[in-house]
Image (cartoon, rainbow, N blue to C red):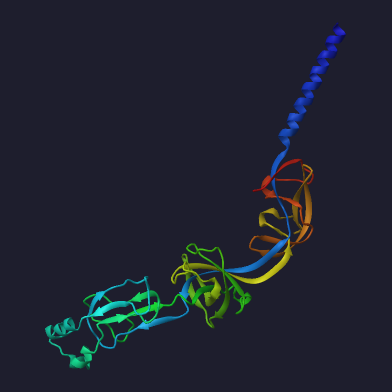
Amino acid sequence: MKKYSILFTLTILTIVGILFTGSAMKETVTPVEYRTVETRTVEETILCTGKVESAESEKVFVSVPCIAGEVYVKAGEPVEAGQPLFSLDVGATKQAMAAAGGSLSALGLTDKDLESAPAEVKAPISGILTTLNVAQGELTDTENACAVISSNESLQVTISINEKSLKKASVGQTVNVSGMAFDKDIYQGTLSYIAPSARQQLAGSTTETVVDAVVTLDDDQLDDSLRPGLSAKARIVIGSTPAALVVPYEDVMQDEEGNEYVFLYQEGKAVKRMVVTGDELTSGYQILEGLQNGDQVIRAPEELELTDGMRVRGTLAA
């Protein structure tokens, strides 16, 4: 009986040891996230900011100085060709001149000139009333436009290109335009103009040197959500690689000799793989050598302190 008791005790201890060892091994397995690398078309772009503007605009003038009567519109509103913008009050103009002790002749005008002034000033074209320099009861200015109407039939995006990116930009390149208020995610256009001189632009608390440029939007891209004055982002496409492998910057590491490498997730282990990187793209490094389509690259390995052959438990990154 004593012999069997010893055997039973040894068996129990062996089982407990196996369970404990398995549990301990399980606890030492490092959890990792990995991404599956796949070939895809990659565009190299220059990101710029700007705003939507009308490619065509019409300035509205009055021929004689006259006090404005009722103002029917506000700046920023859409108007139709022929729509009244404001009225002119000839009687109030004469009374104001008399009260001030002046005369029409002092302005080089006659009663006939004032009587020929239209009762209302109307919009010459349809579009957005971007500027209105008229207020009820005030004298209109004949030298400056009393209103500016921007046509919404032909739109463009004015952008600023940073000087460090200027040498990569050229007229004729495709531009993808987006904006928070736009109906579609992307509108396509063409870089149609680059200014011959640079200027200084405020960027936060500092200034940067930029060059102004114009993106002409394709006519078939226009819709009612593209309004003059809205802010926009523009990505100028300066190059395209049809079948590229791209790995995020944080997934690529470098050893003391400057050699670059990644860690792959293979059969529950972290496997070190040397790579050769190419262009630095918006989404990461282009991989020229060392990886192939379908490889599973471990995400941000430096944070995990991985070593070659380490046991890991992988989860596909979202």
Residue 133 visible: no
Using residue 3 as the reference point, say whether residue 139 is left or right of it: left
Q: Where is residue 35 in the image (x, y as percent from the top left)?
A: 70, 51
Q: Which residue lies furthest to the top in this view?
A: 1
Q: Check the image and name the residue furthest to the right.
A: 3
The x and y percentages for residue 15 are 79, 21
| Left or right of 126 in this view: 139 | left
Seen in the image, is 87 located left or right of residue 222?
left
- Count of labels shown? 0
State the image coordinates of residue 124 (x, y, percent, origin top left). Answer: 37, 82
Q: Is residue 292 above or below residue 190?
A: above
Q: Where is residue 5 in the image (x, y as percent from the top left)?
A: 83, 10
Occupied quadrant, residue 176: bottom right
Indicate the quadrant containing the N terminus: top left, top right, bottom left or bottom right.
Answer: top right
Q: Which of 80 and 235 is in front in this view?
A: 80
In this rendering, position of residue 154 left or right of residue 63: right
Position of residue 101 relative to residue 288, above or below, is: below
Query: Which residue does the image show at 27% across and 74% down from the upper left?
Result: 71
- In this orientation, does residue 56 appear? yes
Q: In the figure, 312 relative to 81: above or below?
A: above
Residue occupying image coordinates x 63% and y 71%: 237
Frontmost residue, 176 versus 271: 176
| Residue 66 position by quadrant | bottom left
